[in-house]
Amino acid sequence: MRSFTICVVLFLALLIQIHGKDDDLNPGFGKIGCNLFDGKWVYDESYPLYQASSCPFIESKEFDCIKNGRPDKFYLKYRWQPTGCNLPKFNGADFLNRYKGKSIMFVGDSLSLNQWQSLTCMLHTAVPQAQFTLVRDGGVSIFTFTDYNVKLMFQRNAYLVDIVGEKIGRVMKLDFLYETETWKDKDVLIFDSWHWWLHSGRKQSWDFIQEGNKPLVKDMDRLVLYEKALNTWAKWINFNVNPAKTRVFFQGVSPDHANGRDWGALGANASCVGETRPFFGLKYPAGPHPAELVLERVLGTVKKPVTLLDITTLSQLRKDGHPSFYGFGGHLASDCSHWCLPGVPDTWNELLYASLI
C-alpha cells in the first residue's frame, strides 16, 4: 500500500512538473497553444507601469491625459490577463540587454507613435539612470539608450504606400514604395496603418489614386484601397526582408470608440467621452473590426515571417482608455482614437516583449 501511495505522489508531481498548476502558470506560455491575445482586463493596483511625469520626452502632449486634467484614474489600473496563461512581466533591463547594439523601428501613423512613445517610457522607467538621446533625422525620430546602443526609431508613414505631388494634385501611388531605405537592415520592424484611411474632405491626404496604368480615380471603397496598399507592402516584405536579420511585426488595427452603439451604449451621441471602465461583456457587440479582417487576409499571403501583434479585440474592450476631452484640443475636440499614456499601448508593448522573447 505504501509503495502504491508513493507511486501516486510521484506520478502527480510529474504531471504538475509537465503541465503546471492552473494557479501557477508558466508566465506567457503556461499551456501549449495559449493565445496571449485572448483574455480579459483585470483590475491590478500595481499598475500603471510608469508615471507620465517620469517621461519628459513625450513628444505628443495629447497622450498625457493626467497632465491635461483627466480626473478619473481607474483606466490606469487594468492589466491584460490571457486565458490559460500569464504574460511575462515586462523587464526593461532584460529588453535592453537582449537588444544591445540593435535597432527597432516603428513605421506607421499616430497610433504607431502612441506605441513607440509608450515603449520609450517603459524602458526609461526600468533603467532611469541610463543615458539617452532623442533626435530627429529627416523624417525619423530616434530614441537611443547610449549605454546599451539600442535605438528605438519612429517613422511617420500613415499609408505605407506613397503620395506624390504632381501637376494634377496629390496622387496616391498604390503600386509603389519609394522611401523605404530606412526600413532596411533593422533588427525589428513594427508596422501600422489604418487610422488615416477613413479620412475624407480636408483631412484626406490625396486628390487622386493611381494603380499601375489604370486611369486615375478620385476615390474607391476604403477597405479595398487599404487591401491594395497592404498587398504592395507585402510584396516589399517578400523581396527585401532577410528573416535571419530582421523580425517583422504588424500592429493590429487600433479601434476607435467614437460610436457608443458599438458596445451597446444608449444615446445618439454616446462615445468614449465620460467612459471610465472597460467593456466587461463576454463578446464585443460590434464584432470583429472589418479592417482587421482585411489585414489578416493579406498577412496570410506574405511569404516571409510576419507576426501579427493582435491588439484589436483587447483594445476594443477599452472604451475608457482614450483622451476624449483630455487630449491636445481639450474641450474643443474629443479624441476617441488615440490612447492615454500610461495606458493601453503599454499592454501592446508587454505583448511585443512576450513575442520577442
Image (cartoon, rainbow, N blue to C red):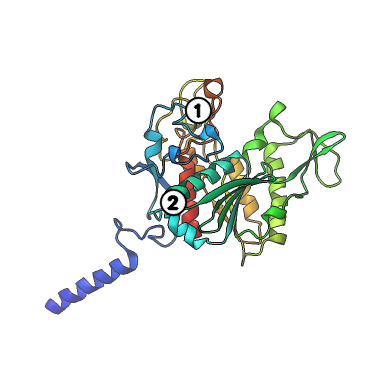
Q: Residue at x 53, y 33 (%)?
A: 61
Mark 2: amino acid: Gln
Comparing 103 with 355, the one in front is 103
Image quadrant occupied by the N terminus: bottom left
| Mark 1 vs 2, N-terminal side | 2
Comparing 111 with 40, the one in front is 111
Local crowd size for mark 1, using a 10 Å CA cut-off: few (<14), some (14–19), many (≥20):
many
Mark 1: amino acid: Ser
Per the image, the residue denoted by label 1 is 324
Residue 296 visible to the viewer: yes
Give left or right: position of 91 versus 149. Answer: left
Give x and y (percent) for residue 151: 57, 54
Q: Is disc 2 placed on a helix, strand or loop?
A: loop
Give left or right: position of 2 versus 90. Answer: left
Per the image, the residue denoted by label 2 is 129
Give left or right: position of 117 versus 5. Answer: right
Q: Nearer the viewer, mark 1 or mark 2?
A: 2
Q: Is disc 1 placed on a helix, strand or loop?
A: loop
